[in-house]
Each structure stands twice: as C-alpha cells, then as structure tokens.
Amino acid sequence: MDRTVEVKFLSASIGRAFRKFFRSGSGKMAFTGAVILIIFLLAAVFAEQIAPYDPTVRSGKAFLSPNSEHIFGTDNLGRDMFSRVLYGSRIALLIAFIAVLIAAAVGIPLGLLSGYVGGPLDRVLVLIMDAVYSFPGLILAIAVAAVLGTGVINIAVSIAVVYAPTYFRVIRNQVSSIKSELYVEAAKAIGAKNWTILLRYVLPNVLPSVVVVLSMNLADAIMVEAGLSFLGLGIAPPTPDWGYDLSNGQRFILMNDWWMIMFPGLAIIVLVLGFSLFSEGLNEYLNPNVGERE
C-alpha cells in the first residue's frame, strides 16, 4: 500500500512539474525547439525510407527547378536536392554531436580539477584555455581541419578544439564557488575523498549548466561544420553535406538556380534555430533569475 502511495505521489509531482514547464514562456520556447530537433532527428534516422532517390547519383536532368518529381529540384549533376538535404542532416547532426561530446569530455574534467584544486594547476590550465579561447572559432577550426584533413572524426575534433574551453570556463567558475559551500566542507570533515566530493557533491550541481551549454554548442557546431564544408575542408563529395551543397550552388546563383542554395541554407537556419530555442528556453527555466536581471 505504501509503495502504491509513493508511486502516485511521484506521478503527481512529475505531472505538476511538466504542466508548470509547458505553461511557462521558457517551456513553450524549449518545446518548440525540441519539436524542430525531433523532426530533423527523424529525418536523419529514416532518410533511407523518406528520400525518393539516391542522393549521390543522377536521378533527373540537371538544374531542374522544384517540381512534382523533385520537390527541391536537382543540382548541376542531376542529383535530387530533397534527398541530399535529408541525408545531409545525418552528417550535420553526427559531426555536431561527436564534436560536442569530445569537447565536453575534455573541458568538464579539466574544469572540475582546475576549479577544485586551484593553485599552479589552475593557473596553467586557465592560461592554456584562454589562449585557445582567444582565437576566432571558425579560424581555429579551419586551421585544425587543414592539419587533420577531411573525414567525420577529423572535422569533429576540429570543432571540439573550439568548444572545449567553453566547458572548462563554465565548469571551473561554478566549481570555484561551489567548493566553499557548507555541504562540501561537511563532506571534507567526515573524511570524504576528493574524487568522491567532486563526483557526488560538486558535479551534480554543475550539470544543469552543462546541458544548456551543450545545446548552445550544438547550434554553433552545425554552423562551423557547414562553414568548413563550404570552404572545402569538410566531408568529401559526393557525400551529401549542406555546406558543400551551398558552396556548389553559389556558383550557379547568377543563372537563377536559386533552389540549389535555398534549401540547404534553410535546413541549416531551421536546425540552428531549433537548438537555439531549446537551449534558450531551458536556460530561462533552469535559471529564472537571468531573465529578470536582463
């Protein structure tokens, strides 16, 4: 009986939390972003079932404007643009997720150590991360990509180098203030080891900020990946890629073949908008005082 009461109470609490979330402006913003992201994720996962043609081979005449058979038209090689946009979502999301995970895997542990240990280690890590952070993101990614070469992992690493300092700075600043809290001092007093304090008491309190930063970095990573591919440093053709299709289509814009850059460009804009809405809504919900201060 007690177990049933606990389950009902937990269900009611979760229900109230969801209703409060969706009724707030930040909740609606995050929900709108989540819907956009889900649509793109479904398009990426089920591209083979949705795409009417193979995106890498000729499926019609070159330079066909949007019509009933090719709703996004065809490119200069007769490839279906709708199919290329669908498959391109796979590359964009895959590289963005890998890049952000690598950046978080590097930045979060270093930020925890730097903020908690302090001293010479903190000064050295801050100096290194600030030096990396001072470079313009796209220029740094171009430099690293030029050294590593093309490929999904190489491009993801190039982007991860740009965003690792972001995680480091956010985590370090929060840990520096959290380590002086009473519950951390109490854990030290009872003899808890440093690793135990970091993982059990400090890390859970900085994770909400990590989630927000992660979703914001995903939006930036999509644009950086498209920029690298536009410059020829991304995925090698004929693999569908939004940045490459933009670069390819801009050569023919004066011929009035507008669809070759319009649809890949719209895909980038809408996906970035989805990540931005989701991260902004989540940030306002988790940190309601931010909106009030502004």
Image (spheres, grey):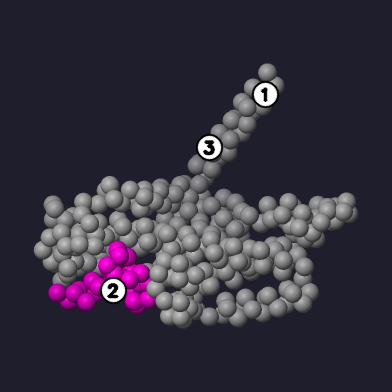
The answer to whether residue 142 is magenta is: no
3D distance between C-alphas at marks 2 and 3: 45 Å
For numbered disc 1, what is the local secondary structure?
helix
Q: Position of residue 133 (x, y in %)?
A: 57, 76
Q: Give the residues in magenta.
A: 229-255
Q: Residue at x 57, y 55 (%)?
A: 211
Q: Residue at x 77, y 71 (%)?
A: 118
1 or 3: mark nearer the eye: 1
Residue 266 lies left or right of residue 113; in this view the side is: left
3D distance between C-alphas at marks 2 and 1: 61 Å
Q: Position of residue 163 (x, y in %)?
A: 54, 69
2 or 3: mark nearer the eye: 2
Q: Which residue appears farthest toward the top when viewing the image?
A: 1
**Disc 2 marks which amino acid?**
Ser
Instruction: Assign the C terminus to one quadrant of the image.
Output: bottom right
Marks 1 and 2: in contact by CB < 8 Å?
no
Q: Earlier in the sequence, mark 1 or mark 3?
A: 1
Image quadrant assignment for residue 62: bottom left
Q: What residue would you read off at disc 1?
A: 3
Q: Residue at x 48, y 50 (%)?
A: 30
Residue 261 lies left or right of residue 157; in this view the side is: left
Q: Earlier in the sequence, mark 2 or mark 1?
A: 1
For numbered disc 3, what is the local secondary structure?
helix
**Disc 3 marks which amino acid?**
Arg
Task: Tell which of 117 and 175 is nearer to you.
Answer: 117
Labelled disc at residue 33: none
Q: What residue would you read off at disc 2?
A: 247
Q: What residue would you read off at disc 3?
A: 19
For numbered disc 2, what is the local secondary structure?
helix
Q: Is residue 24 visible?
A: yes
